[in-house]
Image (cartoon, rainbow, N blue to C red):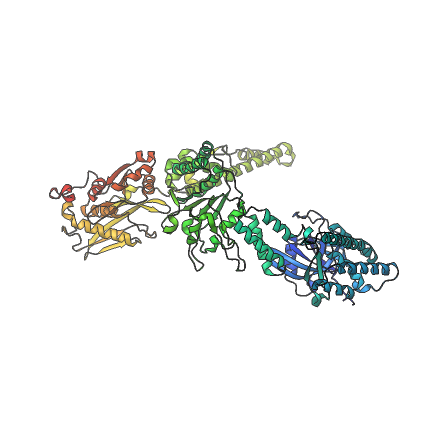
Amino acid sequence: MGSTAIQIPSRLPLLLTKEGVLLPGSSMRISVESSRNFQLVKSRLLRGTSVKSTIIGVIPNTSDPDSESEDLPHLHRIGTAGIAVQIVGSNWPKPHYTLLITGLCRFQIVEVLKEKPYPVAEVEQLDRLEQYTNGIGELSELSQQFYKYAIQLVEMLDMSVPVVAKLRNLLDRLPKETLPDILASIIRTSTNEKLQILDAVGLEERFKKTIPLLVRQIEGLKLLQKTRKSKPNDEKRIVAIRPIRRNNQLLGRPLHLDVVEDDDDDGDDIVMLEKKIKNTNMPEQAMKVCIKEIKRLKKMPQSMPEFALTRNYLELMVELPWNKSTTDRLDLHAARILLDSDHYAMQKLKQRVLEYLAVRQLKNNLKGPILCFVGPPGVGKTSVGRSIAKTVGREFYRIALGGVCDQSDIRGHRRTYVGSMPGRIINGLRTVAVNNPVFLLDEVDKLGKSLQGDPAAALLEVLDPEQNHSFTDHYLNVSFDLSQVLFIATANTTATIPPALLDRMELIQVAGYIQEEKIEIAHRHLIPKQLELHGLTPQQIQIPKEATEGIISRYTREAGVRSLERKIGAICRAVAVKVAEGQHKVTNSSSTHVAAKEGKEGVPEENKSESITDTTDVALPPEMPIVIDRHALKDILGPPIYEMEVSQRLSQPGVAIGLAWTPLGGEIMFVEASRMEGEGQLTLTGQLGDVMKESAHLAISWLRSNAKKYHFTNAGGSFDLLDNTDIHLHFPAGAVTKDGPSAGVTIVTCLASLFSGHLVRSDVAMTGEITLRGLVLPVGGIKDKVLAAHRAGLKRVILPKRNEKDLDEIPANVREDLDFVTAFWLDDVLNAAFDGGFPADSKHSILNSKL
């Protein structure tokens, strides 16, 4: 059968392959991983509009196959022009392509025209199949000899196999000159032997190099047949024949068959994968699933999309750390020192970590606890998790859960979907390669819901010490033991965490810092960090503690230290400008000095004195170090943000200060009231929730019922406070939503000041809820609220009596600065909120009202 004439373009893009040698007439799968080959596929093959545009030059890469250097490696002189008949792409675990290339003919590189983004060369076609006819002389003898050995090789195979029978028929139909390349690609040969055949441009030389390889293969098969006869019960297959692809319609090329010996093919990826699976010490259930999948993989053609999916699944199963773990570093003394050096304060949190290490030291099989750090932003929750991993000696992995609204992010996708992948938990274990890391689930309170499910519900199994020993990811579909993982979750508030998920975690409150702690943190951690980031040294800038205290009190009012760090960064940038300008002036002045000394002739007489004077002025460098004082703070950061005194707000009756808790920490909250003639209406403004509105109505009812006792009268002198009187109650900062059961006592005190005309003390803040009978109920967030009062410079804090136990969490120096008054009744609140107490009618004594 004659062959179709082939004419390749004179310019070809070059594909460098490390996986073998492509010969004319054969087909080969090539995995595209390097950046050059990746660009070639995207720019040339995927955009090709004709057959010629998909013809590329395949060059064996004899240099370092893993080299990703920018320089083009040394190229082999001769390559094979091939056509891409199939392109398969995948995005997991990373973007890559797999090409099926069929060889057309040999070519020789004349000149490399360009190297980036992929090499393109001017080539010369070496062999044209139509030029070969039945040769004479030695060439004819070599051709007949080769054909005889090829027939002998095929007849040694099992002719009952349809593929073997097709191969036998093809040998009779193919031109003799095409047989050396095709048979050399079928039989077992080394890469160097295939390179020699590729370099054999002459047909006579090619026959001479291929015949010994054919004879070697025949002798090997004879030896295997003898071995099989001596061991009749041996079930090993001698030869496996795998059809790769028929490309007759596109190119007029023959069917290409790959004949390999399975029992010796250690280079086969599937065989290697099977060995890895058997060597992996995975549980029996997982091993059964892997063995079943590897059997399916062997029977599956590589062109099927499911082939890549199954192979990716098996590679993931091999890479998972089923029994790989790190040894905990159980030195309590060293752990205490490390935690103290990394983080200032946070005593309760550090103590919990040391307790875990102590128990782990006494009993080695302790399950990993589920800790949840709850606190405002910027207090160091995430960085503490990283420090814990360093303290214990474990790998650290952070999973950001903010905005996640798909349960598949946690539990993975089922493998029936296209693009399926494991969840973040399993993917994190694959990344760290150990089964006992520290997992930080960041912002667990900001999970969302969508049509794809509830990820918070998907976390229930992960974060349950009684269940996570058999966590099942949808992608794996087999259980994985998470009991040795130390899970740490972070949240700003527990209000948005579902109760079922909250019940599985051990809550550790991380409150904001007091001023003294912020100063220590700034000088231990923040200032050195910012100096390093901005290229400054302590010899160039000094920020004394007085300046740090000024930044904290007048420019930041927060629970954490993020704003403080930003302000320090702003100072460093301003100083960096001064330092850079000073160095520039010194450089210019030194060069001017040199010019004045060496080039007097070049300077006119009338300008010499002027230039020298300018030099002395410019040569003055700025004084080092630059010390930041109050005036420097004002120049750099602007006027103070929090300069207004609280006493200015309380200069009139009808104003009181309350304490509120927010996810960002505690804050002080002003409550204002006014009255005017009207019809007895109560107006509430300030974007209040239902709970706050109920507190306001409760306060009005209690004041009306106790008006005579406290001599509360309206504008007309009546004890009925709403008689011809409207009351307006306002909570400033109307853009901020305010709700929660903690403003009742503040509203009562504000209205009591309004109706009595007495001023509330300007250094008092309060918190607590009330009942209709005047009982003060406990509230939460006491530590954050007290720290907010301390930051605002207040001196007295009124708390519910039942919150007295929460004062143990307040730092000692804060307790010394503040005067705490615990109230059981509203009478106690009023007496503490006004100077000299609040006068009551003797006929209605406090004792009688309580009884």
Tell me the quarter of the image containing the N terminus: bottom right
Q: Position of residue 781 (x, y in %)?
A: 32, 44
Asked whether, in this view, residue 320 is left or right of residue 100, the answer is left
Identity of the residue drawn at 79% across and 67% down: 2
Asked whether, in this view, residue 842 is left or right of residue 278, the answer is left
Counting labels gives 0
Tell me the quarter of the image containing the C terminus: top left
State the residue in front, 722 or 845. 845
Residue 106: in sight, yes or no?
A: no
State the residue in front, 460 or 55. 460
Identity of the residue drawn at 62% across and 36% down: 604
State the residue in front, 62 or 10. 62
Q: Position of residue 262 (x, y in %)?
A: 68, 54
Quarter where residue 170 is shown: bottom right
Q: Residue furthest right?
A: 137
Q: Is residue 9 above or below residue 780?
A: below
Asked whether, in this view, residue 447 is left or right of residue 127, the answer is left
Q: Is residue 589 above or below residue 52?
A: above
Q: Residue furthest left?
A: 843
Q: Position of residue 572 (x, y in %)?
A: 48, 39
Residue 813: in sight, yes or no?
A: yes
Q: Position of residue 536 (x, y in %)?
A: 51, 36
